[in-house]
Amino acid sequence: MNDHLEPEEFAEIAATRTVPPSHVAGCEPCADELKSFLALTSRLRAMPDAPEALSERARIYYPRRRALDDLVASMAMDPALRARLARDPAVVLREAGLEPSPELIAALTDGERDDSGAGLRLAASLWF
């Protein structure tokens, strides 16, 4: 049985600042994941123009971000997946649980782009 928290649970805890389940204290992967979520939420709250509905946006963002991270990790290890992404990115993104926006497709498939802004483009495509 997998006792690890799901991205939605991390998002809820980070966005609402609630106390995590006791499992997190004894599980290094979950503790690291929650720490990452809390740091990001803290940075977002510190923004001068932070969205009013930060908690709701964070609940939506975190699972998307986790799905994207998982997809990118899979792409790094699986040449067949990279080929499928090149042929039909929308299908691959939907299978990963992501909405295939033009920005997300471009960020993942445009080999000519300047990578310095790729992270920001990906984050924006997931956040908004």
Image: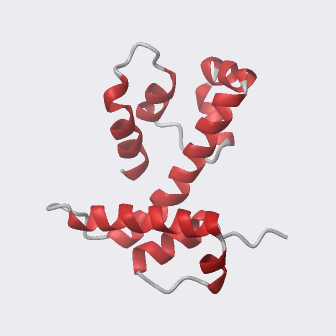
Kindly give the residue lying farthest to the left in the view shown: 48
The answer to whether 6 appears left or right of 114 in the picture is right
97 shown above or below 9: above
Residue depicted at 73% across the width and 27% down the height: 78
The answer to whether 21 appears left or right of 39 in the picture is right
| Residue 98 shows up from this direction | no
Kindly give the residue lying farthest to the top in the view shown: 112
1 shown above or below 21: above
- Measuring from the top left, give residue 118's x and y in whole percent: 38, 32
- Measuring from the top left, give residue 49's x and y in whole percent: 16, 61
Q: Quadrant of the N terminus?
A: bottom right
83 shown above or below 29: above
The answer to whether 102 appears left or right of 29 in the picture is left
Please tell me in which quadrant of the rendered image residue 102 appears: top left
- Measuring from the top left, give residue 93's x and y in whole percent: 61, 37
| Residue 101 shows up from this direction | yes
Residue depicted at 54% across the width and 63% down the height: 33
Please tell me in which quadrant of the rendered image residue 58 appears: bottom left
84 shown above or below 100: above
Q: Nearer the viewer, residue 102 or 73?
A: 73
Residue depicted at 75% across the width and 73% down the height: 3
Q: Nearer the viewer, residue 24 or 79?
A: 24
Kindly give the residue lying farthest to the right in the view shown: 1
Residue depicted at 61% across the width and 18% down the height: 86
